[in-house]
Amino acid sequence: MELNSREVATLFWVAVILSCILIKGINKDISTSLEAVLKSFLHKKIQVIIWGGMIWASLCVFLLEEAGIWTVSNLKTTVIWCCTFAFLSTINAYKIAETKNHFKNEFRGIINTTVIVTFITEAYSFSILTEIAITPIVTLLVIIQALSERDAELAKVQKLSNFLLTIAGLAYVANAIYMLSQDLFGFVSLENLREFLTPTLLTCLYLLYIYTISIFMTYESLSAGLANIIKDPPLRKYAIFKSALAFNINLKALHLWKVHVGIFSPVNKEEITTSIKEIKLQIHREKNPVPIAPEQGWQPMSAASFLSDKKLIVEHYHRTYENEWWGDAYILKINSGHLNRDSINYTIRGNDTAVKRLKMEVTIHNKDFHLIPENLFIDIGHELIGCSTGSSEVNLGQAINVNSDIDIVIGLRRVRLLRENYKHTKTGGYFRTLIVDHCPLYRASEDAR
């Protein structure tokens, strides 16, 4: 239960930061924000979830103790686990329904080589003075690393931060290996096995609670959302009952149905039943994709993942107005060095069985800061053209450099590159659009606008 040098150093710097804040005082804006956060945290529903989590965690500890795995000597590890994984996962439980393969990824991360290496390096820390010296440096590098993944300006120092973090990681590992070689029989003990298993098993057990809470939050959100869509209270209760009966703990299906209802606003029981049947059929198609002929278009699940390597994945392909099917990826934000963030988005459209059009668009707010977003657009655009046509003959970079549009047919497909300037802007903002149609004659509803 003793604190090691690394934990003491962490507590030391936390105390230093808090002391500085108290000495300098908290300005009015920060104070107001903290007060708002505290009020939200003390909300009745939030407190029920937090206290429920504490009770569940206590029950998990009790079960491990009864099984002979947990002892009082594991209390420090348990407290750290509660303050980190348990607390954060409880607060973020509402995101689970919108996150693909959340629990599968959590379980994969519980036991792997990284976890084992981390446990060994945590078991052997440097001297207290060394840890006090390097803790703020490593923390700063981690923050820079996290920010550099989203901020183009900080990307310039990403390589340096990566290099320094690698050096620090190797130093931690080298120290742990050296200490382990000096104390191998002391390390291989029942106590250390308990220390390793405690957070691992607690995480496995606590994920059951998180899953339960995520279901509760999903139905809470569903009920609140339907209040604005279905005005008739009895019909709204019927809709919630039928959806719960049909989808029960399938959070993805519930989310898809909520989106569907938001678009079509059913006004009677028959329309609600029909909407549920449609979502069930959609889920079945996603689980059992049917190959389609190239002349019909692209298989929806394949088209949705064409740009998965570029972090542009279409999660939901669904029916919209005019019986057209549509899906979009989360917008990829780009910091080009000016106030407004540029962005790239990817959408697919077609019918229930095939995607007919792929569309990627880059929004550039200032023509003087166009290089970063356009280079990224060119890179992703070539990926999209290659996946959708099987060809690499289109040179987007050359066309963009001479500010030229493209309209060519490659096999069965039609590829277009268009530019449109923003009106009434002093910064010369514009956007470029890359469109790949499954055949040259295809027309979408948006073409008529």
Image: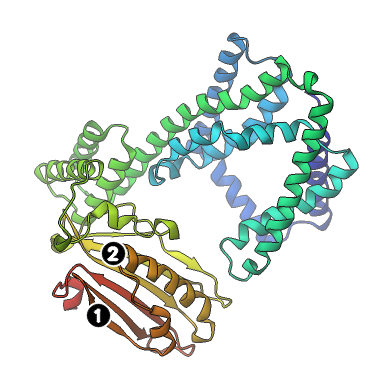
Element class at badge 1 = strand
Whole-percent x, y for residue 46 in the image: 51, 38
The local crowd at label 1, few if under 14, some if 14 to 19, many if 20 or more residues have their Cα within 10 Å, is few
- Tell me the residue at 35%/88% (across/down): 404
Camera sees residue 3: no
- Tell me the residue at 65%/69% (across/down): 156
Quarter of the rendering containing residue 102: top left
Left or right of 339 in this view: 358: left
Please state, as top left, top right, bottom left or bottom right, where the C terminus lies in the image: bottom left
Name the residue beneath numbered marker 2.
Answer: 388
Whole-percent x, y for residue 329 in the image: 36, 59
Left or right of 277 in this view: 287: right
Cα distance between the residues tagged 2 and 1 = 14 Å
Please state, as top left, top right, bottom left or bottom right, where the N terminus lies in the image: top right
198 to 14, vertically: above or below: above
Element class at badge 2 = helix
- Tell me the residue at 18%/47% (across/down): 290
Q: Nearer the viewer, residue 253 or 104?
A: 104
Whole-percent x, y for residue 196 in the image: 65, 25
377 to 317, vertically: above or below: below
Count of number-bearing discs: 2
Quarter of the rendering containing residue 314: bottom left
Q: Amino acid at mark 1?
A: Ile
134 to 42, vertically: above or below: below
Q: What's the image's color scheme? A: rainbow
Left or right of 174 in this view: 155: left
Quarter of the rendering containing residue 144: bottom right
Q: Nearer the viewer, residue 93 or 167?
A: 167
- If you read the primary sequence from the N terminus, does the residue marked by circle 2 or circle 1 appear first? 2
Q: Amino acid at mark 2?
A: Ser
Camera sees residue 377: yes
Name the residue beneath numbered marker 1.
Answer: 408
